[in-house]
Structures are given as C-alpha cells and as structure tokens.
Image (cartoon, rainbow, N blue to C red):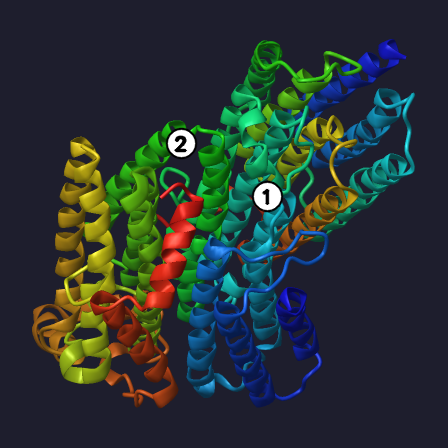
Amino acid sequence: MNVWLDAILILIVILGLFIVASTRLGTMIHIFGLQSLFLGCVPFFLYAKEMELYIIFVCLAAMVLRGLIMPYFLFWAIRHVSVRSEVSPLIGTGTTLLLSGFAIAGAFLLASKLIFPVKIGSDMVIPSSFSLIIMGFLLLVGRNKAISQVIGYLVLENGIFLFAILLLKKMPLLVEMGILLDLFIAALVMGIVVNHISVEFNNTDTTQLTTLKD
Amino acid sequence: MLIFLVLFPLIVGGSVFILAEQKSRNRMLFFTAFLHTACVFSFWKFQPAFVLNGFLGLDALGLLVLSVVSVLFLMVSFYLMGYFKNESDVSHRIFIGFLLFFLSFMTLVTISRHFGLLLIGIEATTLSSVPLINFVKTRQSIEATWKFLMICLIGIALALLGTYFLAVAGFDNVQSLFIDKLLNHAKELSVPWLKISVIFLLIGCGTKMGLAPMHTWLPDAHSQAPSPISALLSGCLLNCAFLSILRVGQVCFAAGQTPFFSSMLILLGIISLGVAYVFILGQEDYKRMFAYSSVEHMGILAIGIGLGPIGIYGSLLHVINNAFTKGFAFLVTGNLYKQYKSKKVNDVRGVLREFPITGIFLLAAFLAVSAMPPFGTFISELLILYAALIGHHYLVAFFYCLFLALIFIGIADIILKMIQGQSVSSVIMSPRLKHSGVNCAKDLNVNKDPSPLGLRMKTRESLSMIMPILILIVIVLILGFYIPPFLDNDLHKAAGLLGG
C-alpha cells in the first residue's frame, strides 16, 4: 500500500513540474485537472484501514471540484478571452524548472526538520505538499498571463490541500467543506475579473497593469 | 441572536437583487445597517450566549471590533444615500447587495470562535469586496481589483497553511481549532509547530491588514474604490484582519510565547511606519496619501500590541479611534472627489474658500489622522509611546516618534496646500494660461474630465453627505476627552485576554 501512496505522491510532484514547464495554457489546465484527481486519491491510500464516510465524501467533492469543474471553468475562461499560450514569461521555463528542482530539495530539507507528531503512512506527504506550494508561488510570480497566475494559485492550493489531508481525521467536516467551496468561489471571481481585464485591455497580460504606482 | 446578526444582512443582500427601485434599495441598506447597530448595542448590555456548538460567540475583543464595524457601516450607509443621489441612472443592485454581504461576513469574522471559520470569514470578506472596489469599471480600478484579489487570496492561502500548522501543533491533545479549547490547552502545544504557524498566520493576516511589506494592494484598492468603500475597507476590513492577528496573539500569550509574537509585530510595525513615511512624502494623489496613512496606523496598532499591557490597551483604543478617523477622512475625500472630479492634489486648491464645510472637515481629518491633541487618536498614540518608554524599548520609541513626526510633516504639506490658497479655477485661469495656452489645453486633455476644471459646476454639499462625517468627528473628539466607563471596562477586559 505504501508503495502505491509514494508512487502517487511522486506522480503529483512530477505533474507539478509539468505545469511549471509548459507554456500552453490548455496543457497546463489539463495537467492541473489530472493532478487534482490524483490528489483526491491520496486519502484512500493514507487512511485505507480506517476509512470513514465523510473522508470519502470530502475526497470525492475535492476530485469533482478541482479535477473536473475547475478545469472546465478555466477552459471556458481561455475560450472567452482567446489566449492560448504564455508567450514570454517573466521567468523563463528553464529557470523556473531549475528553481522548482531546488524547491523540491528544500522542501525535503524543511520537512526533515519539522517532525510530525504522529506517524503517517508515508514520509513523502509533507515534502510533496511543500514542493507544490513553492511551485505554485513560482508560477504566480513568474508568469504574465492572468490565467497562468490563477493556475499557479490553484497549484498552491493543491499543496495546501495535500497538507490538510493529514488533518482530515481531526478536523470537522464543516471547515474542510467550507474551504473547498471558498476555493471554488475564489476561482470563479478570479475568472470574472480576468474577463474584465481582457475586455478592458484587449488581452490578459498582467504586465499591462502598471498604471498604478508611486 | 448571533446567527440572526450574520444571516439578516445576507438575506437582505440577496433580496436587494430582486428589488426594482433604487430608492427602496438604499432605504433597505440603511434599515439593515440600523438594525445591525441596534442589535450590537444591545450586546453591550446583555452578553449573547455561544451558539452553533460553540462556533459563534462574542468576547470583549470581538464586541469591540463588531461595534466599530457596525457603527461605521451605519454611517457609510447613511452617507451613500447622498452619494448616489446624483447618479440615479446607474444601477447599484450588485453594489448594494455585495455591500450587505460584506457586512454579514465581517460580522462572522468578529464572532467566530474557530480558526477555520475565522479564515472562511476573512476570505469571504475579500471576495465580497471585489465588486465594491471594481464599482467604476475603469482600467485603473480593474488593475487595483486584480492586485487586491491576487495578493489577498495568496495571503489567505498562507494563513490557511498557518492554521493547519496550528492544528498540527495541537495534534496530540487539543485536536481542534476552537479558540477556547486551544487557549485552555495552550501549554501543551508543540512549540516549533506553533512558531511556524504564527509566522504564516502573521504574514497571511498581515497581508489582509496591510502591514508592510505585504501592503502593496492597499494603496491601489483604497485609491480606486469609491470613497465610502475606501472608508469601509480602511475602518472595518483592516480591523477585522487585525482581530484575527489578535486571536493568534491570544494563543501565543496562553502558550507563553508572547516575546516571540511581540518582537515580530514590533518589527512589522516599524517597517510599516517607514514605508508609509516614504510614500506619503510628496504623494500626488490625496486618496493614496490617506491609504498610506492607513498603513501607518496599522503599523502603530501592531507596535502597540507588541509593547505589553499599556501598549495593548492603547492599541485597542486606537482601533476605535483609527477606524472612525479613517472612516470620516475617506468620506471627506468622497466629498472632495464629488466637487473636483479629480484625485490629484494639484487639482484641488482653496477648499476652505470654495467649500467651507468640506474644508473644515478636511482640516479635522488632517488633525485627527496625524493625532493632534483634541482628537482621540492623540491619547491612544501617546499611550503606546508611554508603553514603549516604560518598557525600556527606547529604540522603538525613537523610530516611532521619528516616523510619526516625518509623516505629520508629509501630510501637513499635502493637506494644507489643498485647504489654503485660491480656488483652482482662478489659479488655472490666470498664470498658466498666460504662460502657455497650449500647455494648459494639453493638461486639460490629459485630465480626462467630463467638465473642464474652469467650468466646473458647484454642487451643493448635501446634508446626508455632511451628517455622517460630523457624527464621526464628534465621536473621535469625545474619545479624546472622555472614555465612557462601559468602553473602558470592555477595553480592560479585552486587553486582559491578550495579557494586558
């Protein structure tokens, strides 16, 4: 069981690297959806022996929201604003990949310093979660297109969700669900604002948002 | 009762979308705000019980912030009746609906007794304020909205991670994120996880609160939002974020980690003061100047909390003073913008001569924001300085005084220029036109103004745009002379929760 869990976690991180490396928005969204689906599988392996109904519920909700609805919505957004790819990112894909590599190493280092109070199914959960968070950050700061930034934010949220899975047993259902829902609404609002940007500026390049400064 | 307080604005906000008539929507808004305030005032007399399995409850800290939010919201909703009077052709359906949602979520933040719920509340306030900031759909306001949304959402994501770390810190024995339970078992929390969680929560909530260096969204959002919204953002939203930091502080105090927490807050506070000073000096946009002054005051709040019992009392008093001061200061900028149709300092001259009431209000705003003696802000800032001196934090006291003095000079330079002198029309018409007519014409073109400055129509200062400001000024003035016993009592209780 443990081997499968590790394999999935490695896959999730590699998919994260894929997102960081690609410039085509469609590919990024596809891979993000796939990553979220795998992420939803993690609890099934982590809590294989002590499965409870609400855990299944939260996982399924996460898979549907992050894996299906959100990508669908993002596709709607890029059709609407008709951008296809990130032409000239602020930080090139090669540099971002290299930085992501360092980030993964750093995440393992950090996770070895912070000792989780109880034994968990795999040593890989916390480092993978930290890696995803940092990769999300890299996307947020390194890309110009508003949609890429939204994807970066979602990858960051995926990392946080991976960490939250460790706490699934101890946290009330309400909070988890609330956070899932919040995330969904956040993406929705961001999509609407992206639309506003594209209407007003004729494209969604956030480098044009520079009129306000001191 | 607490559930009602959250749900009522939410329901009315939803029903506003159906109402056809603009006037009835405005009345609905005012009525809801009034009922909300009445409810909150009743809580000063009868403490409401915990509801929803302890998820919602009101303590001294929550009551303080809730009252500030409620009163300021009432004033702003009063002000909006006049603000919208001349623009009845535009539909404000979405605006008023989301304004009420905003009130509901801010209420949720102040009364939640669970860290998860607190974060949901804060995130909901961010999302519900997006349509408010983006009310005038210009390029600049979209840019401001995008920055606000992205930066605050990332901040909240970090705070969420911090909350999870907090849950891990209490994994063995607390096993919940209820504030009361965490406080009772704070001594058993694992210290390394608690510390990392405090760092993340401070950065996350500090982003929302506008502490430098995470403040970058604040000046843009405050300057681009309609002025009543700037007042709400500055007076209510930032204080709600501050409340969440205070909740973290409560846990730190109970866990015996106050020195760690205090030192971080003092550091962030001093940085905020420095940043505010740098950007206030020579600021060309008067709303941006008040926005940076908000950064300054948030820094003062943070420093006060870090300085021990007297500082905490002063800081909590400053929450009230600052909220009302900033509230009326931004409402005054609303009046100015209505008259001059420009946010540039250079376009506004001789306010005192042309619009005496607004001019006096602007002067009052200047004096209150820079904490001059008759106003309440003076007392609270003095208390914080006193706390710094008594606690032998001489370096903190030095930087505090230095930056406050410099900021005073910066604001004085800007505002006094605006208040005094001849009116704009005569200034523009005489010297510059003579000098080079082409240049002036270009200026007017750049200044995308529906009516050129010279031909600007004088609109009368309407009563509903004056009364709320006057009431807020009087409140701040009274707080400068006299702190009512019930308030003093609550402040002491609230400071006690934080170890004061």
* Distance (Cα) linking label 1 and label 2: 18 Å
Residue bearing mark 2: B258
Quadrant of the image occupied by residue A58:
top right
Q: Is residue A148 left or right of residue A181?
A: left
Q: The residue under label 1 is which amino acid type?
A: Asp
Residue B142 x %, y %: 51, 57
Residue B351 x %, y %: 18, 77
Q: The residue under label 2 is which amino acid type?
A: Thr
Rendered residue at 81%/46% (across/down) = A69
Residue bearing mark 1: B180
Name the mark nearer the viewer: 1 or 2: 1
- The answer to whether any part of residue B482 appears in the image is yes
Residue A32 x %, y %: 75, 32
Q: Secondary structure at mark 1?
A: helix
Residue B347 vs B199, above or below: the answer is below
Q: Secondary structure at mark 2?
A: helix
Q: Are marks 1 and 2 in contact (CB under 8 Å)?
A: no
Rendered residue at 72%/56% (across/down) = B52
Marked residue chain, label 2: B
Q: Quadrant of the C terminus of chain B?
A: top left
- The answer to whether any part of residue A88 appears in the image is no
Q: Are marks 1 and 2 on the same chain?
A: yes
Q: Quadrant of the N terminus of chain B?
A: bottom right
B235, B411: nearer the viewer: B235
Which of the two discs, 1 and 2, labels the residue nearer the N terminus? 1
A59, A202: nearer the viewer: A59
Residue B286 vs B25, above or below: the answer is above
Badge 1 crowding class, 10 Å Cα cut-off, few under 14, some 14 to 19, many 20 or more, is: some
Badge 2 crowding class, 10 Å Cα cut-off, few under 14, some 14 to 19, many 20 or more, is: some
Rendered residue at 57%/20% (across/down) = A96
Quadrant of the image occupied by residue B433:
bottom left
Q: Count every numbered label the image shows and give the total.
A: 2
